[in-house]
Image (cartoon, rainbow, N blue to C red):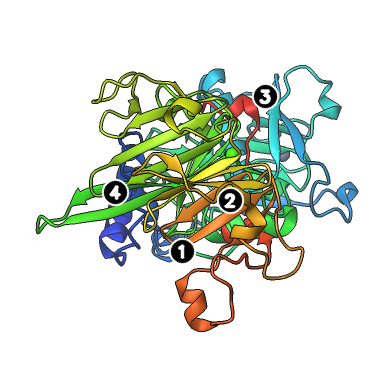
Amino acid sequence: MLAASIFRPTLLLCWLAAPQPAQPEALFHSRDHSDLQLSPLRQAKPITDLHDAQVGEGQKNRITHMHEMPAAGAARAFSKKTLSWRLAREAPSGQLSLHEQRAIFTLAFRMWSEVTPLHFREDLTAPGATVDIKLGFGRGRHLGCPRVFDGSGQEFAHAWRLGDIHFDDDEHFTPPSSDAGISLLKVAVHEIGHVLGLPHIYRTGSIMQPNYSPQESAFELDWSDRKAIQRLYGSCEGSFDTAFDWIHKERNQYGEVMVRFSTYFFRNSWYWLYENRNNRTRYGDPIQIPTGWHGLPTQNIDAFIHIWTWRRDERYFFKGNQYWRYDSDKDQAHTEDEQGKRYPKSISEGFPGIPSPLDTAFYHRRQQLIYFFKESFVFAFDVNRNQVLNSYPKKITEVFPAIKPQDHPFRNIDSAYYSYAHNSIFFFKGNAYWKVVNDKDRQQNSRLPSNGLLPKKSISEKWFDLCDVHTSTLNM
Ligand SMILES: [Ca+2]
Ligand SMILES: [Ca+2]
Ligand SMILES: [Zn+2]
Ligand SMILES: [Zn+2]
């Protein structure tokens, strides 16, 4: 019997013994504090070999077995992108409330959808035979299944590739908040991995390890899990409304002001925080805009700029004909700022000569210019004089020329983004990005035109796991 009390001390030892994990991306906004607190725990990996050694008194607790249904035949992965699931009405667990069970399964499916193009939808009404993944609990002989459960311990669950999942209700299943028993969430995530086509992965940290490791306060899919499932289903593609770095100044232990940043990607009504250092999205994203950004339009933001000079430190969001100023300290949009300006304001009033709605914009700190983009034109706006530079607007292709002929977004750029992680400007359009030549590129190759656009690449090759989830699970 796998009892958490036996393993708790072991796990704590593992945490102490583990090398310092890489620091997570620093997060600076009050809405991100939960992530900051969780990160060190999430990064610590239980040492499963040690755990196995502890278990090894004649008992081998295999989290699961996977079985191939003969009929499933050659298919290794689902061919459709939206899959339905249901907890069989006749087979819930006797240990947790129905509400808890469904919430745990919803979260387990969501965790896979956060890193794949797959969407999962709970279907309570369709005929059973048409539901893609059916889940059920049983004891001993169960649910007409050819494989009999073995009572408490040993096998916790089993699953069929592209099929159903059974849980042994003789196990002490508990919700993720519990530090006792066996986490139903972890077992479900592992089993869903099998159903989706994953074999066991023998790597510390992987949820697809054959042996169960005890509960952590939060767990997530490992890099190896993400890459394995993406080999089967591909990586996530999609366009963004805007992307930007959020700058934060803080004092270090010596009282020096440090500038740090986090990266955000916005699409429709939701957003992701991107951890540049770990090259992945934050655990649990995307989330809805109003959850993290207060007083902004709830969807389809056109653009963001951060005006940053010796005298000014102002952040603005643009949508339609209007713009909003965001108060970083209070974590909400200003209704009125310290100069008595009321928001939202019309773009034509605050930025004379700038058309609306905008495609995108970014602030160039060294030049103290905002570049506003509209269709095939770019407007350079002097923030000190509050006016468009004389020679503008110009064609985007004139200011940011293609290096490879015709390899250019030309018009209607989704987002122009200055990345502090890469010290570069990027243009996004659809699934593609173009990197603007920076000083370092020119030091390496002096023939590159300044502000030239390097050939386009796929966004998903550079920024990982920016995946939509089913809208029914956006609010989790
Ligand atoms: Ca069992
Ligand atoms: Ca945009
Ligand atoms: Zn397994
Ligand atoms: Zn079964």
Q: In front here: 22 or 304?
A: 304
The kind of secondary structure element at disc 4 is loop
Q: Dot 3 lies on which element?
A: loop
Badge nearest the viewer, 4 or 2: 4
At label 3, counting other C-alpha atoms closer than 10 Å, the crowd grade (few under 14, some 14-19, many 20 or more) is some
Q: Nearer the viewer, mark 1 or mark 2?
A: 1
Q: Earlier in the sequence, mark 1 or mark 3?
A: 3
Ligand 2 resides in the quarter of the picture at: top right
Residue topped by disc 4: 309
Numbered badge on residue 422: 1
Location of residue 375 with respect to 425 vertically, above or below: above
Residues at marks 4 and 1, CA–CA distance in whole angstroms: 21 Å
| SS of the residue under disc 1 | loop
**Mark sitting on residue 91:** 3
Earlier in the chain: of badge 3 and badge 4, it is: 3
Q: Earlier in the sequence, mark 3 or mark 2?
A: 3
Task: Name which residue type carries label 3.
Answer: Ala
Left or right of 97 on screen, residue 192: right
Residue to which mark 2 is pinned: 465
Q: Nearer the viewer, mark 1 or mark 3?
A: 1
User: If you read the primary sequence from the N terminus, does the residue marked by circle 4 or circle 1 appear first?
Assistant: 4
Q: Are marks 3 and 2 in contact (CB under 8 Å)?
A: no
- Amino acid type shown at disc 4: Thr
